[in-house]
Image: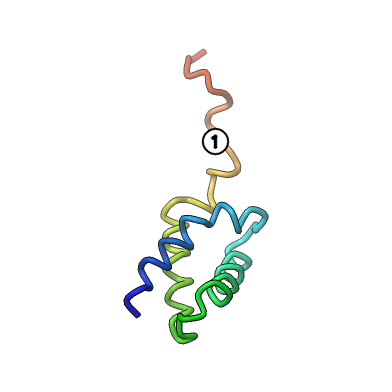
Amino acid sequence: MDALPSIIDDIANRADDFLVEKSDRKEARATIAGLLASEYPEVAPKDYAAVVKAVMAILEKEDFFGTEFAGDSWHDSDDDSEE
């Protein structure tokens, strides 16, 4: 399906909205699959895994599940001065 790249980008770009309280990757994958099924019924079920995998790869590259949401433990404040 030619529309898969745009669907993948759309889902990845909206991840902040629908993965707000999802704490782990397994939960995120299930949520992405559910969103795909409800919002993109034209996507063949055989393509679901590839779409979910591609969205997760984008989120991993953006450190969606990493330190970004936990804060930077090496930097306590916005003050860049050294003590």
Which residue shows up at 67% across the image and 55% down it? 21
The residue singled out by tag 1 in the image is 72
Q: Position of residue 57 (x, y in %)?
A: 43, 63
Which residue shows up at 53% across the image and 57% down it? 15
| Label 1 element class | loop
Q: Position of residue 24 (x, y in %)?
A: 62, 61
> For residue 9, which quarter of the picture?
bottom left
Q: Position of residue 56 (x, y in %)?
A: 47, 64
Q: Is residue 37 above or below residue 22?
A: below
Q: Position of residue 63 (x, y in %)?
A: 47, 51
Q: Is residue 57 above or below residue 2?
A: above
> For residue 43, which quarter of the picture?
bottom left
Which residue shows up at 52% across the image and 13% down it? 83
Mark 1 Cα shell of 10 Å, populated few (<14), some (14-19), many (≥20): few
Which residue shows up at 65% across the image and 57% down it? 23
Q: Amino acid at mark 1?
A: Asp
